[in-house]
Image (cartoon, grey):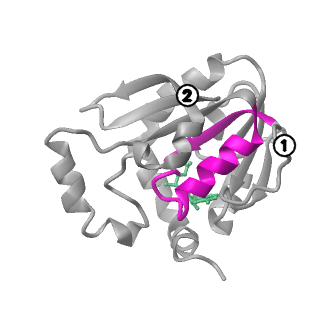
Amino acid sequence: MLSAQTNFYNRFSFLYPLVDVFLKPQKKKFFNIINKLPEGKLLEIGIGNGAHIKLYQRHQITGIELSTSMLNIAKKNAPSTISLFEMNGENLTFESDSFDYVVLSHVIAVADKPEKLLLECERVLKHSGKMLILNHFTPNNHIKYIDQFFNLFSGIFHLKSIFYIENFKAINHFKLEKEIALKPFSYFKILIFSKH
Ligand SMILES: C[S@@+](CC[C@H](N)C(=O)[O-])C[C@H]1O[C@@H](n2cnc3c(N)ncnc32)[C@H](O)[C@@H]1O
């Protein structure tokens, strides 16, 4: 049976381009960083409708996605060099130690089981591979009250608006290498972790 979250993305995949307009500037920065990394095997989990696929300029890319509707749109956006699969990031079918990079763009705060997702990222990453996360992170300033208010109904969007990555035990299996706060308000960040 499909999870409520997958049903949500299956139903509203046609509206996602509107959300993506808002995410475009931060994704540009994120992919600039990814494109400067040494050539490698990269897995993007929750690649969505693949609106940003065109921003990848290097690497051997594999994308996975839970929602069939989002994946079907991604397939239309993707060149044949990118491999796309319907798969759950919390239960990957890839061999251990098989990727140099794992990319999570606005996925970890919507995943049903983020701990499991992080453990799977760790498993499929090669030794000293990197996990790159773009997401919102609840800050320790007045903006946390907006997150707290929005949290009253963010469940409708299958999203955790109050989001502290340090609350996940599995994040301790990684070493934080770099944190880049994005404007405005540093609410969105790029975090680069390496596998211990
Ligand atoms: C907010 S969208 C982000 C899409 C894209 N990464 C982006 O940055 O535009 C979250 C996506 O993650 C997918 N997703 C959520 N949990 C997932 C999981 N456990 N495995 C694979 N995909 C997942 C959803 O179906 C949805 O397409």
Give the left or right position of residue 92, taking residue 35 as reference.
right
x and y percent of residue 7 in the render? Answer: 56, 75
- The kind of secondary structure element at disc 2 is strand
> What's the amino acid at mark 2?
Lys
Q: Which disc is residue 57 wearing?
A: none
Magenta residue check for 184: no
x and y percent of residue 27 in the render? Answer: 49, 34
x and y percent of residue 45 in the render? Answer: 65, 49
> What's the amino acid at mark 1?
Ser
Quadrant of the picture in which ligand 1 is shown: bottom right
Magenta residue check for 109: yes
Residue ranking furthest to the bottom: 1
Q: Residue 56: name its quadrant.
A: top right
Residue drawn at x 42%, y 52% as measured from the top left? 19
> Which residues make up the magenta segment?
99-126
Depth order, front residue of 175/117: 175
Residue denoted by label 1: 80
Give the left or right position of residue 185, taking residue 181 as reference.
left
Residue denoted by label 2: 175
